[in-house]
Image (cartoon, helix red, strand yellow):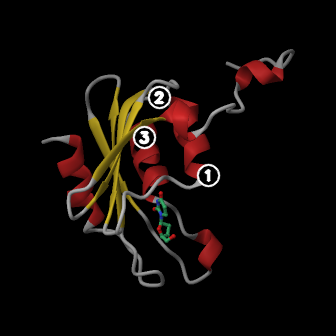
Amino acid sequence: MSLIDAAREVRETAYAPYSGFKVGAAIRGASGNVYRGCNVENVAYPEGTCAEAGAIAAMVAGGETELIEVCVIADSPHPVPPCGGCRQKLAEFGRADVPVLLATVAGETLGTTIGELLPGRFEVAHMAGVDVD
Ligand code: THU
């Protein structure tokens, strides 16, 4: 199954009773395995989580920490870009040249990369002197 089909499928499972805006995300790990996530809202609004965060959690739970491809889909007039927080989350596990496909349910797509979404990202090199595993 293609990444976009996986994102389209998981979007249907989104829990979005407050915004009514369902989002699906699918990411391919370096192994080739595909991990999916959907947005999960909460009556305490800030506690909701984005589709990208869910897909990343699934990848890490699956034993992988490097992603090589991302797709996000929503039923919006134009492809929806990941929020600021999700850009940083994606950048944690993907190189700047990792392709990100943004798509609408209707079929419009926009290709970008993690680097384009988050130029000047904060990364471990900025913490010189701090030991990181
Ligand atoms: N949302 C995502 O899941 N991913 C994005 O990239 C943009 C926004 C969700 C969060 C919230 O549940 C709903 O869309 C409306 O903001």
Task: Indicate the quadrant containing the N terminus: top left, top right, bottom left or bottom right.
Answer: top left
What residue is shown with label 3?
Answer: 61
* Residue toward you, 58 or 3: 3
Looking at the rendered structure, the kind of residue marked 3 is: Ala
Q: CA distance from mark 2 to mark 1?
A: 20 Å
Which residue is drawn at the image coordinates 42% and 38% (left, top)? Answer: 112
Which residue is drawn at the image coordinates 47% and 53% (left, top)? Answer: 81
> Which quarter of the figure has residue 35?
top left
Q: CA distance from mark 3 to mark 2?
A: 9 Å
Rendered image: mark on residue 84: 1
Looking at the rendered structure, the kind of residue marked 1 is: Gly
Q: CA distance from mark 1 to mark 3?
A: 23 Å
Q: As drawn, is 29 to the left or to the right of 9?
A: right
Q: Are marks 1 and 3 in contact (CB under 8 Å)?
A: no
What residue is shown with label 2?
Answer: 65
Q: Secondary structure at mark 3?
A: helix
Q: As drawn, is 77 to the left or to the right of 4?
A: right
* Residue toward you, 32 or 4: 4
Whether residue 107 is situated above or below residue 133 in the rendered picture: below
Q: Secondary structure at mark 2?
A: loop
Q: Bin the neighbour count of mark 2 within 10 Å (Cα to Cα): few under 14, some 14-19, many 20 and up.
A: some
